[in-house]
């Protein structure tokens, strides 16, 4: 007999992947100059405030060369800035520019509005329970 938690976890993993994919596609449709990976990189920087390129690559699960190219494109768009570390000049920090932060805020709001539209059909008690469960899973993931 298969473990009910494992069976449910597989379905949840698939569902969350589909939700993320569809929101990413919606995002790409609304902003042709920014890819989903670029947006998630900007959102990561918004959350962490500043990161080294190696840290961004590790968080995104991509190679250093791939993230370097991505950061270069974001830099050319004026969405991120490079800042040398005061104590160790070999370290370069990547952080959002005000334009980058504004774009993250705008696109995050559009994603939230899209998701809210989908959730409006839920009864209030189901909506509240869904929120609690997702927040609990998020906390457990770290």
Image (cartoon, helix red, strand yellow):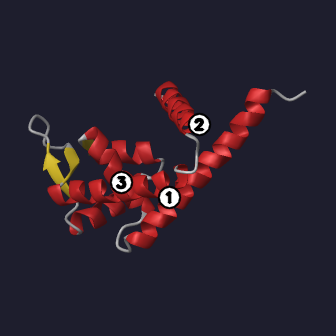
Mark 1 / mark 3, whichever is N-terminal: 1
Q: In terms of depth relative to the viewer, which is nearer, 43 or 27?
A: 27
In this figure, which residue is indicated by the disc labeled 1?
23
In this figure, which residue is indicated by the disc labeled 2?
126
Residue at point 13%, 40% (across, down): 85
Residue at point 77%, 35% (across, down): 7
User: 65 left or right of 5?
Assistant: left
In three-dimensional space, the C-alpha distance between marks 1 and 2, rounded to whole angstroms, equals: 21 Å
Secondary structure type for disc 3: helix
Q: How many marks?
A: 3
Residue density around tag 1, few if under 14, some if 14–19, many if 20 or more, within 10 Å: some
In three-dimensional space, the C-alpha distance between marks 3 and 2, rounded to whole angstroms, equals: 23 Å
Q: In terms of depth relative to the viewer, which is nearer, 75 or 141?
A: 141
Residue density around tag 2, few if under 14, some if 14–19, many if 20 or more, within 10 Å: few
Mark 3 / mark 2, whichever is N-terminal: 3
Residue 20 position (above or below residue 3): below
In this figure, which residue is indicated by the disc labeled 3?
108
Place residue 59 in its image quadrant. Answer: top left
Q: Are marks 1 and 2 in contact (CB under 8 Å)?
A: no
Secondary structure type for disc 2: helix
Picture coordinates of residue 23 (x, y %)?
50, 58
Check the image and name the residue furthest to the right: 1
Residue 121 position (above or below residue 74): above
Give the label, 1 or 2, closer to the camera.
2
Q: In terms of depth relative to the viewer, which is nearer, 56 or 116?
A: 116
Residue 129 position (above or below residue 117): above
Residue 64 position (above or below residue 132): below
Q: Which mark is residue 56?
A: none
Q: In terms of depth relative to the viewer, which is nearer, 132 or 41?
A: 132
């Amino acid at each position: 007999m298969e473990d009910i938690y494992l069976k449910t976890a597989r379905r949840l993993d698939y569902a969350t992947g589909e939700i993320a994919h569809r929101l990413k596609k919606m995002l790409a449709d609304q902003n042709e100059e920014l890819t989903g990976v670029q947006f998630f990189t900007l959102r990561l920087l918004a959350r962490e405030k500043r990161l080294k390129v190696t840290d961004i690559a590790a968080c995104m699960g991509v190679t250093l060369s791939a993230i370097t190219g991505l950061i270069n494109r974001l830099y050319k768009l004026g969405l991120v800035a490079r800042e040398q570390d005061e104590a160790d000049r070999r370290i370069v920090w990547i952080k959002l520019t005000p334009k980058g932060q504004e774009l993250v805020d705008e696109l995050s709001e559009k994603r939230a509005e899209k998701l809210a539209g989908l959730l409006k059909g839920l009864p209030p008690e189901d909506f509240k329970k869904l929120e609690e469960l997702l927040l609990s899973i998020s906390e457990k993931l770290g």
